[in-house]
Image (spheres, grey):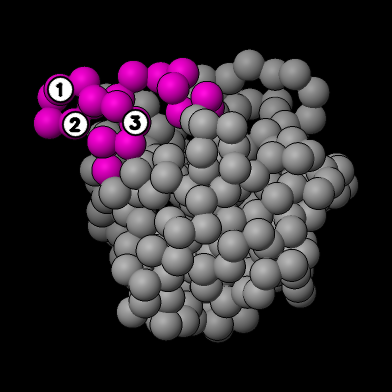
Amino acid sequence: MKTAGPIVGLFFLILLLPITSHGRFVQSLDLKTLMKRSQLVFVGHVNSVNPSGITTELTYPTWKGIVFEWLKVEVEVLEPIKGIKKGEVVHTLMLSTRGSVAMDNQPGMIEPKEGQNLLLCLLPTTLAGVYASVTAPFDDDQAIFPLDHKHWTRATYYKDGKEVAFAEQSEKNRAIWELAGDKGEINRKEAEHLRKKYEPEIAAQPSKDDIIHLKWKKETNAGGWQRNVPDDGSKGGGNKKAKDAHGPITKP
């Protein structure tokens, strides 16, 4: 037992190396994996965006004093891909911050707007009937994507060391680009293409333990390393995935 502390500390240090060298680790998944891990996948239209009043603590050295609040976003299904029907309204939560704040290596947040069209890959949350990004809360924007060409032409993209157009960087980028036209119109043929191409992944169902936790708290080990763990009562309930869930491992 006397060696447990140093071993855990070394393990945390190994995990931390990419963070200290290159910034916060981002959970980026390819489209095939997103299709497989999600319970719901669809092209949706944002009907409304409102504060939910649900706040949480997220721990990272550059996030001190930041109040994170989930936005309540109602999204109407335009093109169903997995687990949902056209015309249904899905109750989602998307992470935001209270007030205008600046921070380094911030969580990947969506900033949803009424009237916006999105591609959403979702899992249930700890609230019944409410969903969130598969990669929430630290990387919402890695599983919810604006279907707006202008949004994706604001940055420079690279593949194999060469500058490329957004749609040429990956299969996921191509699908995001093709799902909407230059004026934002939804390409129903591309949605049908995705339904056929990813049929095995669409048929796969996530485990009942695959849920998005809304409440998190800071956990600190004897060596001073910190991380977030769920703070919604699930951790002690025999749910292994809840016990294993955690945020970035850092040391202030």
Judging from the image, what secondary structure is the residue with disc 3 in?
Answer: helix
Judging from the image, what secondary structure is the residue with disc 1 in?
Answer: strand
* Percent coordinates x, y for residue 216 in the rendering: 64, 52
Q: Residue at x 31, y 59 (%)?
A: 4
- Which amino acid type corresponds to the residue marked 1 in the rendered image? Lys
Observer-nearest residue: 111 or 9? 111
* Percent coordinates x, y for residue 92 in the rendering: 72, 57
Please say if the residues under marks 1 and 2 sit with CB atoms less than 8 Å apart.
yes
- Is 16 a magenta residue? no
Looking at the rendering, the stretch of residues picked out in magenta corresponds to 150-170
Of labels 2 and 3, earlier in sequence is: 2
Judging from the image, what secondary structure is the residue with disc 2 in?
Answer: strand
The alpha-carbon separation of the residues under discs 1 and 2 comes to 5 Å
- Which amino acid type corresponds to the residue marked 3 in the rendered image? Phe
Q: Residue at x 38, y 63 (%)?
A: 193
Q: Mark 1 sits on what residue?
A: 162
Q: Mark 3 sits on what residue?
A: 166
* Percent coordinates x, y for residue 22 in the rendering: 29, 26
